[in-house]
Amino acid sequence: MFNSILIPTDFSGKDSHAIDIARELCSPDNGRITLLHVIEIIANTTLDEFDDFYRELEDRALKHLTRLAASHEKDLFTIDKRITYGNRAQEILRFAEENAIDLIIMTSHKIDIEDRAQGWGTISYKVGILSQCPVMLVK
């Protein structure tokens, strides 16, 4: 059993399956599941330059996270919702380290057997090789 599970989400539609798996693996006594959405910052800009734009993205993300969490909060499990800004892979890794996450569950697309190289640059690949804790990929 894991005490602290992180599920980074890009709202691709596979998140419900990842949450179901997290509930199976999370300790019922003191387990914590956190949904994390990272908003990428436009290159060569600052948050202040596009304040209204980023605020709108954050509002939409929070609504989506709230709906997603509410549809899965049952029994003893509370699902935390977090939003950060920056490079997705770096922010996932930073959040996991700073919050003592002991398992990251990520969704991933299926790799085309004819074009295996397409998976090398994915966020899940980067997190998988750089994370200090276990990473589970859900397809």
Image (cartoon, rainbow, N blue to C red):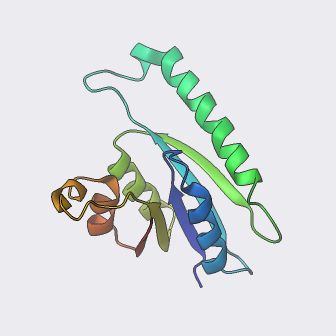
The residue depicted at 50 percent of the width and 68 percent of the height is 101
Q: Position of residue 7 (x, y in %)?
A: 53, 60
Which residue occupies 40% across, 59% down? Answer: 108
Which residue is painted at 62% across and 29% down in the image? 59
Eyeballing the image, is 107 above or below 65? Answer: below
| Residue 79, position as x, y percentages in the image | 69, 59
Rendered image quadrant of residue 28: bottom right
Return the residue found at the far front: 114
Residue 15 in which image quadrant? bottom right
- As drawn, is 62 to the left or to the right of 45? right
Image quarter for residue 31?
A: bottom right
Q: Is residue 113 left or right of residue 34?
A: left
Numbered-mark total: 0
Query: x, y percentage for residue 113?
Result: 23, 65
The outermost residue toward the right is: 75
Q: Residue at x 50, y 46 (%)?
A: 12
